[in-house]
């Protein structure tokens, strides 16, 4: 009985570390790389606007 409880506790604790067993594509996200390893929300871009002076100065 202890072994079963230990295995359940280990599975619960290691679940967030190992990730999900099912692959689900994110909703309303677009892949950044061809492999689909990096994702960003739709409407966002990697372009950073040029800012010569900080707006708070």
Image: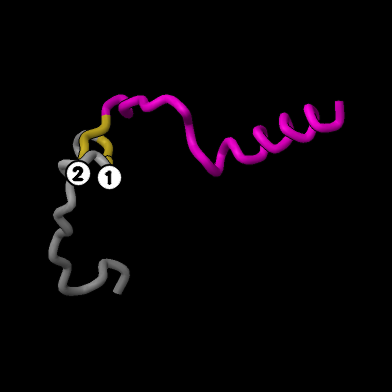
Image spot of residue 4 (x, y percent): 78, 27
Q: Are marks 2 and 1 in contact (CB under 8 Å)?
A: yes
Residue placed most toward the observer, 56 or 40: 40
Instruction: Relative to 54, say whether 37 is above or below.
Output: above
- Binning the other alpha carbons within 10 Å of mark 1 as few (below 14), some (14 to 19) or many (20 upward) gives few
User: Which residue sits at x=31%, y=69%?
Assistant: 56
* Residue 16 circle label: none
Which residue occupies the extreme right position in the image? Answer: 1
- Asked where in the image residue 1 lies, by quadrant, the reply is top right
Residue placed most toward the observer, 37 or 50: 37
- Asked where in the image residue 28 lies, by quadrant, the reply is top left
Image spot of residue 40 (x, y percent): 27, 41
The residues colored magenta run 1-28
Residue placed most toward the observer, 34 or 51: 34
Q: Name the residue under label 2.
A: 32
- Mark 1 secondary-structure assignment: loop
- Asked where in the image residue 15 lies, by quadrant, the reply is top right
Q: Name the residue under label 1.
A: 38
- First along the sequence among labels 2 and 1: 2
User: Which residue sits at x=37%, y=27%?
Assistant: 23
Q: Is residue 29 left or right of residue 2?
A: left
Image spot of residue 7 (x, y percent): 72, 33
Asked whether 37 falls inside the magenta stretch, the response is: no
Q: Is the magenta stretch mostly helix, strand or loop?
A: helix
């Amino acid at each position: 009985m202890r072994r079963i409880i230990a295995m359940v506790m280990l599975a619960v604790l290691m679940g967030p570390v190992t990730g999900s067993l099912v692959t689900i594509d994110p909703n309303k996200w677009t892949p950044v790389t061809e492999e689909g390893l990096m994702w960003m929300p739709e409407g966002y871009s990697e372009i950073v606007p040029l800012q010569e002076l900080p707006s708070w100065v």
